[in-house]
Image: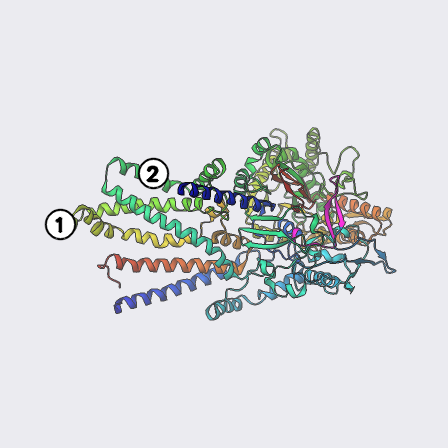
Amino acid sequence: MKKLLALVLAVLMVLSCVVLASAEESKTSINVCIASEPDTLDPALNSAVDGATMIAHLFTGLSNWAMDENGALGIVPACATELPAAVVNEDGTATYTYTLVDGLKWSDGKDLTAKDFEFAWKRAASSALGADYGYMFEVVKGYPDELAVEATDDKTLVVTLNNDVSYWNELLAFPTFLPVREDIVASEAWATAPETYVCNGPYTMTGWDHNSVITLTKNPNYFLADTIKMDEIKFYLSDDANNMLANFQNGDWKLIDDVPNAEIDNLKVQYPDEFFVGSQMGTYYVSWNMNANLLPEGSELTGAEAAKANAEIRFAIGLLFDRNYIVTEIGKAGQQPASSFVALGLTDADGIKQFYENAGPSDEYVGYWDTSADAYEANWTTAMETLKKYYTFDEATQQFTNFPAVEYLYNTSEGHKAIGEYLQSVVSGVGINMSLTNQEWNTFLNTRKNGDYTVARNGWLADYNDPISFLDMWVSGSGNNDSQFGKGENADVAIYSIDLTPYGSDVKVENGTWAQTYDAAIAAIKTCTDKDARYGMMHAAEDLLMSTGAITPLYYYTDIYMLEKDVKGFFANPLGYKYFMYCTIGE
Amino acid sequence: MSSKMFFYVLKRILLAVLTIWIVITVTFFVMHAVPGGPFVGEKAISKEAQAALEAKYGLDKPLLEQYVTYLRDIVTRFDFGPSLKQRGRMVIDIIADGMKTSAKLGLIAAGLAAVIGIVLGATAAIRRNTFLDKVIMVITTAFVSMPSFIMGSFLLIVFSVSLKWLPANGAAQGGLVLPVITLSLYPMSYITRLTRSSMLDVLGQDYIRTAKAKGVSRWSIIFGHALKNSLIPVITYFGPMLAFIVTGSMVVEQIFAVPGIGRQFVQSITNRDYTMIMGTTIFLASLIVIMNLVSDLLYKVVDPRIEFD
């Protein structure tokens, strides 16, 4: 009898455990891994895509990225009731007035007001904060320290821009434009621990095991809480691609944002439904130093003629590279061969057609050269003809004999090295001696920025869908002007021409300096409010940029990730931010 | 404690402080001489912002002044400053966080290595030239010569991916099992070999023969006399080994996504996070210096014949 009783009790205990366990499971949770520990989760200070993904779950701005029923991705109003058009003032500035949605609250229950937005924007733009992305506010009047943004009452925010900007609504969803509260951010440590992390988005931070895992839990105070499907998201923090893959393969992590390069071919076959190649608005390219001379020793060309010759030579060398080979044999991640600097993914004036599809001089191909496999031979011939004008060519060995030795600089990484070796093999085939030098990341950035190189590996990712994000970096004074346009000797070189008069601008310069042409064109673009004219001018600016040959695009970046196939409702935006709040698992 | 020992310890402590001061000075100036800086990124920030940040962290001051301030803050307030990259976090907190995991991982691995290593080594010595001895020697030779990234990856693929017995990330329940094994195999094998050869040496000594002749039992000879005396080389090795293993193994942390201090150290250098570089360097140097001191003092405990001078 006793034995029977004990048995019954034991069975009951086990059953209750099972029931409790299944009750626990009704809460949905997803484990993902997008990168290692973020440098910061302060929306104003963040400049990384992984940080932006987490922040997109923790904060909501005036607008938001969302996917409609048809699966189309776009910008929708979020904290603002609507996204009205600007009122253009007499002086050409543009004023936007936003009304906040009723009942907005911070995660600690306090009311969120327009004042919080005003404070957050002024803080993010200020030079005192020194945020990487503070310059995102440069379109706003008074940037950086007298920002023209004001909360006229608790629910109304008025902001004045230097001129109307077509991508403004998209900026409103960008992390730098998210609201933060003054009393919270007063302590700089606020964004490093869940106890002090007060936010206004779909989730709150409930755990942060540094370098290990960040836990987000659904925010009951969020005004759109009923639309959020996933109850809990755990962002595991790792940057080791092999480790990520192991965790994906054993089922622990549902999404991983990186895979080992060597495994890509296998994974595509092994996981056809779970291996994804997403888009990313970025270009992998080679940048040349405008102040490095490539002409052979004893060349009689000087001044403007030498500068023109160098441009032709750089462009010709760019044509020698087989971009299809690079993407299929080295990159292997679905990258697309590039023939323009403005990347795939950025749209043209109509918002539908890709900007790069309208780039370049020819109707027969897209961009500044034909990247199709069939065209490679013709490109090669053209390039060789150009180079033969300047260098001695030995027909017997099919090699140039007096091309000066050049050094290709890249940052230490197997992938960059493989591409460098390919470029080296191509040019050495025609007698150009190109050595490879690698530098550790931070040193490399420094060398490239200071222009202490001849030719270097480079890459750029856009922060918003507007080609200006690829073009304004090349003005003379830009901190990202690695090619040294309009700097040093190049500042006095007057061989550039641009004509923006067809677009209603008065910029028309023949044989001017970089500052007179390119810088002027970018300034005109930034103040232009007519969409078609503006995009026309951006094409003209890219034409000028590409004519220098100093930018040699190789391919457009992609974003590879693996997502378990029973996860539904996932999407990523064009900037590579990944959204898990609408995800469900199974069913 | 005898006065001789007291002076010995005092001398060693002063030497340790001197060593650490030299480490601080060299690291500080070399670090600033390397090109690049903490606020250099793929996308450039404005000159005003750069200047504001440098002023905020005192990087605009002359290098010598920065050096003096840094030393003063450490000595007077034990203040290692804020991290320049992980905004809002103090260096000391980041190190403490990383050490929680690294120390746990390292202590278990070191303990495991010592216990198993000594037992296996002693067994091999006692059963010298038997089949068991040979098996132990072959296995430990293999482990000593196998780099940890191969061992780690192998264990990961077998136990985590194929069999799914253990998680692949250090943060999960049971996630430290594989890293502990990976981390302990090398020192374990090394200790085994060390114990074996040292024990064989001791077993050949005259006093062991005397003990045997007096009829002391076999086990009493092994535990009472041989083992204790054969541990001196093991202790020499154990001190620094413990310091290295506890301060985190970059490779093992990377393979198993363990949130330890090793990765922080390497990343801080890439990031030019000056305060973090200094903090981690000082911490690791101190630990190694202290462990060396402790193991030197332990000699005396094990072997009273050793004199300090």
| Residue at which label 1 appears | B210
Tell me if mark 1 has few (under 14), some (14-19) or many (20+) residues whose alpha carbon lies within 10 angstroms of its own.
few
Place of residue B130 in the rendered image (x, y in percent of width and height, measured from the top left)? 24, 36
Q: Nearer the viewer, residue A417 or A201?
A: A201
| Three-letter residue code for mark 2 | Ile
Q: Is residue B173 magenta?
A: no
Place of residue A184 in the rendered image (x, y in percent of width and height, measured from the top left)? 64, 64
Q: Quadrant of the N terminus of chain A?
A: top left
Is tag 1's residue or tag 2's residue first in the polypeptide sequence?
2
Determine if residue B167 is in view.
no
| Three-letter residue code for mark 1 | Thr
Q: Nearer the viewer, residue A264 or A235?
A: A235
Pointer 1 and pointer 2 on the same chain: yes
Place of residue A128 in the rendered image (x, y in percent of width and height, measured from the top left)? 66, 64
What residue is drawn where x is 36% and y is 58%? B291
| Residue at which label 2 appears | B139
Query: What distance separates the C-alpha of mark 1 from that of mark 2?
Result: 34 Å
